[in-house]
Image: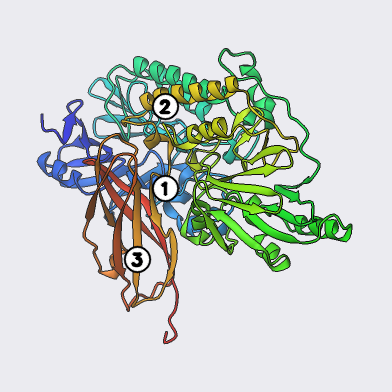
Amino acid sequence: MDPHFSQLSEHLYVHHGHVNIGILRDGDRALLIDPSGTTFSTTLAELGITNVERMLFTHHHRDNVLGFPIADNVRVGVPAKEAPWFAEVETFWNDPQYRWHLYNYHPHNLLLADAIRVTDTYTEGAQMAWGSALLTVLETPGHTDGSITYLIDVDGKRFAFTGDLIYDEGQLWELYSLQKGQQTSDYHGFLGAREELKESLEKVRQALPTALIPTHGVVMDTPDRAIDALLERLAYCYDKYVAISALRHYFPKLFTEFEGHPGHMPIREGKPPPEFLRHFGTTWLIISENGEAFVMDCGSPNVIKQIQQLQADSEVSEVTQFWVTHYHDDHVNAIPEFQETFPCETIADSVVDAVITNPIGFRLPCISPAVTRVDRITRDGDSWQWNEFTMTAYHFPGQTYYHGGLLVEGRGVRMFFAGDSFTMAGIDDYCSGNRNLLGTDVGYEKCLRLIQALKPTHIFNCHVDPAFDFTDAEIACMLDTLADREKCYTALFPWDHANYGMDEHWVRCYPYEQEITPGETAQLRVEITNHSPEPRTATAQPMLPPAWDVEIDPAHTTIPPKVDGHIDFSIPIPQHCKALGRIVVPVDLTYNARPLGQFREAIFVLTCSTNC
């Protein structure tokens, strides 16, 4: 059997490229399911297919949609609920709500760079006869809201092309597409689409298919066993998430079914903060004995008014230092106004600084376009004296990787300001886009080890009025649970470490967005985190608009274990470019010899030069 395709029945084949492409054949003509990339043209030639009549897609993600021109006579069918993300995708890329203040993830930005022509849309129960086959559509949301499955009855068998509902027996391709809110925004919905996914898999199971063919993954000849294994593993993984989730403090009604589960950490009671602290919105403020104020974060102009009132009441003389815990919009939106009002020194961790001084360079959850001036950049463990308090700064990759923590010692207490990283219920890792990494000396494991070593008397969350602390037993419980998670989530994905399936930004473009003028050269860096225990080789290639008539050669790098690597590109923007505005530049990636297709993207905003 030729390794790049397999034959499932007399008339049905699957090409195995960076995705599985279904090929329903009738003589020299074909119907394709999820055609993507160009490598399958070899398979079509070997099968003697010269006429592609139909192309059907299971869902709107860019990595399984095209990458080549569609002939005018080809019919293109897509899920009705996702038709705009095929035929009108520019409405996504040009809408600021899909760029800034990102609390919702549907649709996900893994979208086509350019719209394609759609001739047919499908809803539940739609059927079509083609050649000797009958195709039936099932609406199977989960991986995306509008995902569909195509049942193909052909040659006495029934095959289910399931999109990315399942990868293999007990496995998913990735987890971040399941980020979906129930009673809240998607931001708080870690694995929130798991019930939809379960219902869709059960619907597929009830159709009694001979085999499951996923977009990413392997052909499964025992559907019941594959589905049962995935649902069992997913339930176990979610339980390990709930066990120490800080969200139990904020939204207890979301987790009533888990009350009393063994291994779940009890929720701590809080304690009153010292009398020299004030809390407004997401801002903590320390008042020194001489009346000076040290302020942390400013998400709202109301905070500025509150501080001015403290000054009017003679509780505060002046603001002399300002610390930014992390980049989220509810912590930085009002910083420009704050800095104009209180011209004090602004301090931030180096990792936080990279985002808040140049937010346009990133695409992250809850990101704000507000630009912060940073006067002092701290490294892990830097200390300084502020009046009677000793301040020590840390990189604190808790709620988000782009996060700092601050130990404040003085007046008989050791206070740790953890941003949004902990509540009395545990850890704030409810958004997969925040880069909550699993493993030794990363993510919350690193944070908990630091708390364990520092032994603060008080821990503060920016959204919670009371202070709190953790016992040695509670820290041990959280560490043990994280170690269990690393194992069970690694088993959930077809990678050698869980972080590939959980860390949406293990591949990212920097800058994510940049303004550029025709005739200039754009600089683009593709950053890649190697989560593996061994070196990995990555190859990247920016895919430029055909009208530019510019092709950038692929480039590669070898990345040592457990560190970041990068590939740099210089991209000339043709002087003749007439289409100004936002240009989506997908990046094709191959990692450790695994082709991933157009896996990430950058945005070029073409602006008119002075001689336009």
Q: Nearer the viewer, residue 136 or 192?
A: 192
Q: Front-most of 519 and 314? A: 314
| Residue at 73% in and 38% down | 412
Q: Nearer the viewer, mark 3 or mark 2?
A: 2
Q: Secondary structure at mark 3?
A: strand
Q: Which mark is on residue 523?
A: 3
User: How far apart, in angstroms, are the residues tagged by discs 1 and 3?
Assistant: 22 Å
Measure the alpha-carbon separation of dots 3 and 2.
36 Å
Label 2: which residue? 486
Q: Secondary structure at mark 1?
A: loop
Residue visible at 76% across and 37% down in the picture: 273
Question: Considering only order in the chain, which callout, 1 or 2, is on the residue closer to the N terminus?
Answer: 1
Say which amino acid is labelled 2: Glu
Is 333 situated above or below 245?
below
Residue 242 image position (x, y, % from top left): 57, 24
Mark 3 residue type: Gln
Task: Look at the image and tell me in which quarter the C terminus lies.
Answer: bottom left
Residue 264, above or below 347: above
Q: For mark 1, what is the residue?
A: 110
The amino acid at mark 1 is: Leu
In terms of secondary structure, where does tag 2 sit? helix
Q: Which circle, 2 or 1, is nearer the viewer?
A: 2
* Residue 562 appearing in the image: yes
Q: Mark 2: few, some, or many residues within 10 Å (few <14, many ≥20)?
A: some
Label 3 crowding class (10 Å Cα cut-off): few <14, some 14-19, many 20+?
some
